[in-house]
Each structure stands twice: as structure tokens, then as C-alpha cells.
Amino acid sequence: MTLAPERKALSARQAIQRAHVLGILEGLDEQTLRQSMAPSGWSCLDLVHHLAIDVERFWFRAVMGGDPAAIASFAEDGGAWNAPSELSAAEVFALYRREAELGDAAIADRPLGGGPAWWPERYGPWKFGELREVVLHVITDTACHAGQLDVVRELHDGRQWLVVDLCGKRERGRCSPPLSLFLSRSGTRPVPGAPSSL
């Protein structure tokens, strides 16, 4: 299936943010991933669990997709900020990847201008009017949380995630895609798995 340019660009940016979330945590052990480094008490695993449930599942599968199982999982509010202790770090990361895949599938055939299939009553009369707004919200939310993870990682061991936008190099009137680099005190390397093209 060929994606329209706007959809293709949104999808690529979303993939870049998802890769950032997982990439900045690469190499951290279970204890570090569960350790709180912020006064509010969240850990890196808590944040990834929140992104899986409250962001990917909620916005794409429940709100835009109207998936009854996803909607039912939100009958009680407030549990997703805590990664369950019975889930390993690998399982939390797998949950995030799975919810991202299921979310992509839930919105694949929906038009960007299409409205929500479901909306929680607790949100009152305000709502996003179309899928385009939801996708932009998810990209922004994921990017903000990736930034939080960046700070935690740098405080832990000095490693940084750097996105180099290569707009000086244009191909057919478009900027080259951003290149993600993982910086450490020992050097810089490209991030494996980061999208290589739009």
C-alpha cells in the first residue's frame, strides 16, 4: 500500500519518536530501568508502560479505532503510570512495540480527517476532531517523554541521543531524513533500527 505524502511523513516521524524511546534506554539493566530518578517518582519502565497503554492503546486502538477490548481496559483510570512488577523490562518493551503495531493497524484504513470512534465521558465536551490531530498529539507526547528519558540517561551515564537534521542535503526538493546518533563518552554511532528514509 502506498501512503499519501502527509500520512507517510506523519508515520515516519512517529517511527522516529518510538525508536528514540527504546533506543535511549538500550543497554540499561533492569535495576536502573526500575529506579526513579525524578522527584515525582516515575521510572524509565513506568514511562514506557505509560506510553504503551495511555498513549498508543488509548489514542489509536480505543479513541480512533473503537476497539471494544481497548476501551474496556480503560474502565478504571490511572494504572498505566506504574509498570507492573511482574513484567520484566523486556516484557514492557515488547508491550510497547506490540501496542504500537496494534495502534498502527487500528488507524491504517482511517482517513486523516476522520473523527474519533469513541470518546471517554470523563473528558467532557472537548475532543480531538480528527485522526490527524490525534497522530500529531501522539508524536508530540512521545517526543516529550523521549526527552525526559534523554535527561535520565544522561544523568545516569552521560549518554545522549542526538538527532541531526540533514536539511542542507536536499533530494528532489525534500530534506534528507533525520539521522539519530547515540552519543557516549567513548564516541558516536548511528542508531540501529532508526528509520533511514521518509
Image (tube, rainbow, N blue to C red):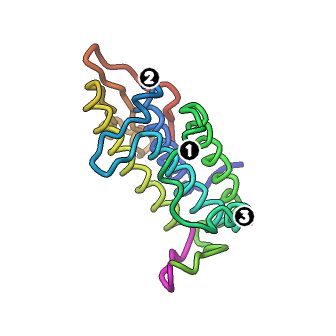
Residue that mark 2 sits on: 27
Q: Is residue 39 visible?
A: yes
Q: Kindly check if marks 2 and 3 are in contact, taking CB atoms under 8 A apart as contact.
A: no
- Provide residue 3's location: percent of width, then percent of height: 63, 52
Q: Residue at x 30, y 30 (%)?
A: 160
Per the model, the C-alpha gap separating discs 2 and 3 is: 34 Å
Residue type at mark 3: give it.
Asp
- Provide residue 50's location: percent of width, then percent of height: 50, 51
User: Which label lies toward us, 2 or 1?
Assistant: 1
Residue that mark 3 sits on: 67
Q: Residue at x 42, y 25 (%)?
A: 28
Q: Nearer the viewer, residue 111 or 74?
A: 74
Q: Earlier in the sequence, mark 2 or mark 1?
A: 2
Count the labels in the image: 3
Q: Residue at x 57, y 54 (%)?
A: 53
Q: Give the structural element (helix, strand or loop) at label 2.
A: loop
Q: Is residue 111 magenta?
A: no
Q: Nearer the viewer, residue 176 or 51?
A: 51
Residue 118, numbered label = none
Q: Nearer the viewer, residue 165 or 115?
A: 115
Q: Give the structural element (helix, strand or loop) at label 1.
A: loop
Per the model, the C-alpha gap separating discs 1 and 3 is: 23 Å
Residue that mark 1 sits on: 84
Please tell me how crowded label 3 is: few (under 14), some (14-19), or many (20+) other residues with Cα within 10 Å: some
Q: Earlier in the sequence, mark 2 or mark 3?
A: 2
Per the model, the C-alpha gap separating discs 2 and 1 is: 21 Å
Q: Is residue 128 magenta?
A: yes
User: Which label lies toward us, 1 or 3?
Assistant: 1
Q: Nearer the viewer, residue 7 or 21?
A: 21
Q: Is residue 131 above or below residue 159?
A: below
